[in-house]
Amino acid sequence: MHRSHLPRAQPHIHAVRDPSRRSAGEHARAAVQRLRLRTLVALGVLAVASAALGRAFGLRDARFLISEVALLASMFVISRYVLPLVERRDRGARAEEHVGALLEQLSGDWYVLHDASLGHGNVDHVLIGPAGVFTLETKSHPGPVRVGRLHGATLRQAQAQRKAIEMLTGLSVEPLLVYSRAWVDRPLARRKGVRVVPARMLLAHLARRPETLSPQQIEQAHRLLIAALQEHDRHTRALERLRAIR
């Protein structure tokens, strides 16, 4: 049985969800669904308002005509800007889900955590196992990808994730930039300390890595990371309750 899941804690009044039970792409998928819902609601409100104006004042009334123009303009903006944004985010969620499914094939010696949130954005995946600790930033770019031309912001993001996990675990962490479907000109090459890995080569790459951590180190790193994620969740929930009271 895969060890990416831990037993559920006993429930209490403000129970914090077990971070190890998050699914791959959970945050990205939720963002896509929220954006789609808001888009549909906005269009629905405009359509209902336009119909109401037409019914109340007649189809030739200026107010009705203005509402129709607003509805058409909104449809244009949505088709030109919102729908492409939804598609990009949906593609990103699918990429995280794809890579997450691959990681679930790792042996029981590995811990796999998805959507690890530490207050400065999400780490798509964190791996802790015999070969070490890894952060995975998943990209859905269709390619081609040239390692020597990777955007500096992408590399800085991966390095920031590495530093955050190193501070929590006290262990060296290797950041991986994983492309779910792109052709990469130099697969497994490193750029400024970040290794670039096509998803199709990910499991084979991990399998070839030498063992560097003992079972005790693996368990300790996992406990520290879970504790930090739970503490962050508690802090986030407390802030949300304060905002709700205000």
Image (cartoon, rainbow, N blue to C red):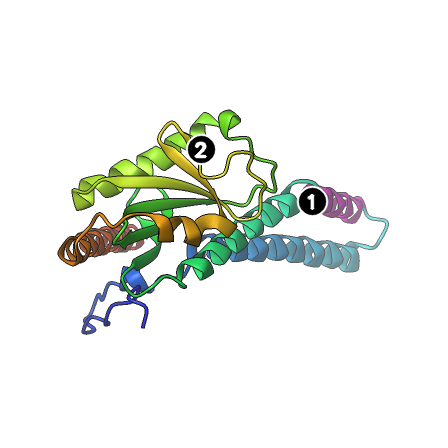
Q: Is residue 110 left or right of residue 145?
A: left
- Residue at the disc numbered 2: 154
Q: Residue at x 32, y 46 (%)?
A: 134
The residue located at (51%, 53%) in the rendering is 93
Q: Which of the pair 105/212 is nearer the observer?
A: 212
Q: Tell me which segment is drawn in magenta.
A: 62-78
**Residue 17: x %, y % from top left:** 28, 64
Q: Is residue 216 above or below residue 136?
A: below
Q: Position of residue 187 (x, y in %)?
A: 49, 38
**Secondary structure beneath label 1:** helix
Q: Which of the labelled discs sits on residue 74, or is there none? A: 1
Q: Quadrant of residue 40?
A: bottom right
Q: Disc 2 residue type?
A: Thr
Horizontal side of residue 209 vs 71, given as left or right:
left
For image coordinates 64% across by 44% down, the residue present is 84
Q: Few, some or many C-alpha atoms within 10 Å of disc 2 (few <14, some 14-19, many ≥20)?
A: few
